[in-house]
Amino acid sequence: MKKKEIEKIPFRGGVRADKQYRNTAVVFLQDIRGESHLFVEVYENKKRELQTPWIRMVFTQKDWGLYYPDARVWSAAGLDEEREKIDSNCKKRDNRCYMARSQGDMVWKFTGDTWERKYTTWVGALQSLIYNIKAQRVQKREDKRADRLKEREQNTPPLPKGLEDWAKKTGIGTEHFLYYKRHGRYADITCSACGQVTEAAVRRKDTYEGQFEKIIPVPQHDSVGTCPHCGAAGVYKAQGKVKGVWGHGMNCFIAQRYKDDGAVIRYVEIEKIYRLDTFLDEKEIMIGAGEKMIITEIARTYLEKGKRPQTDYHKFSSYSGEFWDDCNLCGMNNISIKAAKIYPESYKELRTTFLRYSAAEMYGKHKTMYNLKEYLERYIQWPQIEMFVKMGLHHIAESIVEGYCGIIADKDAIKPECFLGIYKRRLRDLKTLQGNLDYLKMWQMEKRMGLHLTVQESVFLAESQVRQNDLEEILKYTTVAKFMHRIEQYSGCEIPDTMQEPMCGRAAGAVSGVTRTYVDYLHMRIQRGYDLHNQIFLFPRDLRLAHDQMVIETNAEEIRKREQAVSEKYPDIRKNYRGLRNQYIYEDEDYLIRPARSAEEIVAEGRILHHCVGGDSYLNKHNTGRSTILFLRSKLAPETPYITIEICGTKILQWYGIRDTKPDEIRIERHLRRYIKALKEKDQIKSVTA
């Protein structure tokens, strides 16, 4: 659509029509650069509005455009929204737009619409023209897609001849099945390799002739044996346990040269099918067996220099059979391409394409099964992958291949240290760690913050996984070295001074957990306005206790509201305390056991020990008497929460310590057994005296 030239053409002006018409339309033909254009200008049927139309519609046989003069805006939308405003109904009394009959004939002649005028309007004819143009465009696109697909199929080389032999060497083709059926001292054996049925003796006959009979070991299901006919080794399968057809297979990638220096990556499924043939008469009889290798190509990805990768998929239709399509299936039924083995000759083929420097072969030595299609697509997007593979930074390369590109600092950088956003000297350290991502993120943080960490500090920050904003807050009051030594003291774990000897999983988990606790503690101190230049506040002697105290202080208002609410909701807990105390009180030289005094005390127990006893479920059961919450405390610290017990009568339902753990479990269990025994003796005494 030649918009600038169309805008230069003056408006024809509207013709005043009867009052029953809301709009009036003018139609004319104009030749622009040798192409006929149909102009339809719609004016409001008012004296002052007949100079400038509110919409000018321009049509050719291949294009259209809607121009709004007031806003000086073009639109390529259809007439669906405007039709209600300008349409004229077939009935005369409903006409909304006036158009002279001679001009209407111009519209009908230009559109060539086959509908009779009594069934539609001139607006409908123009809308039909737009639909036809859209349909032609869609058909043209589909034809081009089909031509490109056909051209790709014609230029795709055949599958390698040695593919089946390679599959056999990998193990999928070497396994055979020996189907057997025992009867008396004989067994019928059918081999999937030769297909012959052989009757063999499994037990020697006690006669003179029997000593010359060939005996085979007794077949057993899933055991290894040898075919008595062809000598092929195979796995025994009982006839009654194997029915019909069974198969197993594998997927693989095949890379081949495409056109001049392009490549096609083919995703292939190789499957071996085993078949047992039987004849059903009075009983099922084996008559043979067979095996066949089937190679099915699932997808092809075409990679050409300067072009977007294109993947074609092998599909099946019940109407047209098998065919190739340039788009995947939709929804959960889509064809997925996963990691698989690589056909060895693929790397030789890649050396003849523009992907010769992709380092795919070197990457395959590190990871024998991977998605070759995904790797090469990422290499085209990020050529720096070649550097990382050759440097031995396998974890970084693997991360980028899988699409985790958040580790990239500067996508346009040529040097690897600039690409990753780290100091140059850290590349050697990363190489010793094979590109460990935790250390990479830590060293990226080091450069962003302008730090220069020692080896021990690097190990500490990588294992503790401190975030940058948390570390920046910590470094306002201390150094990395002091922070590290304090975490060592809190966790009881020593940070190694070498990266070649990583921390064990338990120690790393302890350091990470303590660090999270300290960061949480520090934020609460800052939130409450404490002066953290005071070392007592910055590094408390008992981090866990100080953290819990800060939690209580920070949540004091919420705690007060919660305790007030449960006190009003569960008043019987306080009322029944004395009776329950007489029933459940117990103490010895080490521990004290007593019931909860109030609902507030149960809530505090759950909050301090970080378990769920403070929830409404346990409070309601204690309040109604369905179960009772008891506290086991050390006699040296009777007010410090230690173990929480749920009991019903003389049966302990459960007991837990801090964070749903069972500290000193053997000793506590022994103590609780003595406690239950004492409760039962107390009940017996009461029953006798009663």
Image: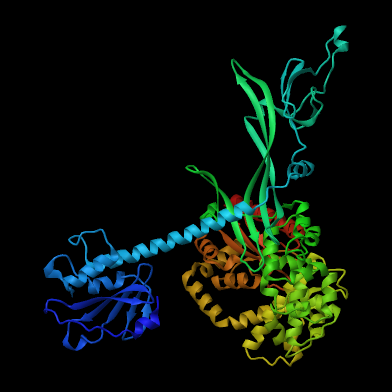
Percent from the top left, x then y, of residue 540? 75, 84
Q: Quadrant of the N terminus?
A: bottom left
One can see residue 544 in this view: no
> Picture quarter containing residue 264?
bottom right
The structure residue drawn at horizontal position 64% and vertical position 84%, both measured from the top left corner, is 524
> Picture quarter containing residue 229?
top right
Compare residues 36 and 631 and report the one nearer the observer.
36
The structure residue drawn at horizontal position 77% and vertical position 79%, both measured from the top left corner, is 415
Position of 590 with respect to 206 (left or right) is left
Q: From this viewpoint, which residue is outermost toward the front? A: 34
Position of 573 with respect to 638 (left or right) is left
The structure residue drawn at horizontal position 67% and vertical position 74%, both measured from the top left corner, is 406
Percent from the top left, x then y, of residue 279? 61, 20
Vertical arrangement, residue 531 with respect to residue 181, above or below: below
> Picture quarter containing residue 381?
bottom right
Vertical arrangement, residue 652 with respect to residue 278, above or below: below
Compare residues 129 and 183 and report the one nearer the observer.
129
Compare residues 460 and 500 and report the one nearer the observer.
500
Percent from the top left, x then y, of residue 635? 73, 70
Compare residues 572 and 187 and report the one nearer the observer.
187
Position of 359 with respect to 552 (left or right) is right
Q: From this viewpoint, which residue is outermost toward the top? A: 208
Vertical arrangement, residue 437 with respect to residue 627, above or below: below
Q: What's the coloring here?
A: rainbow
Percent from the top left, x then y, of residue 657? 68, 65
Q: How many marks?
A: 0
One can see residue 677 in this view: yes
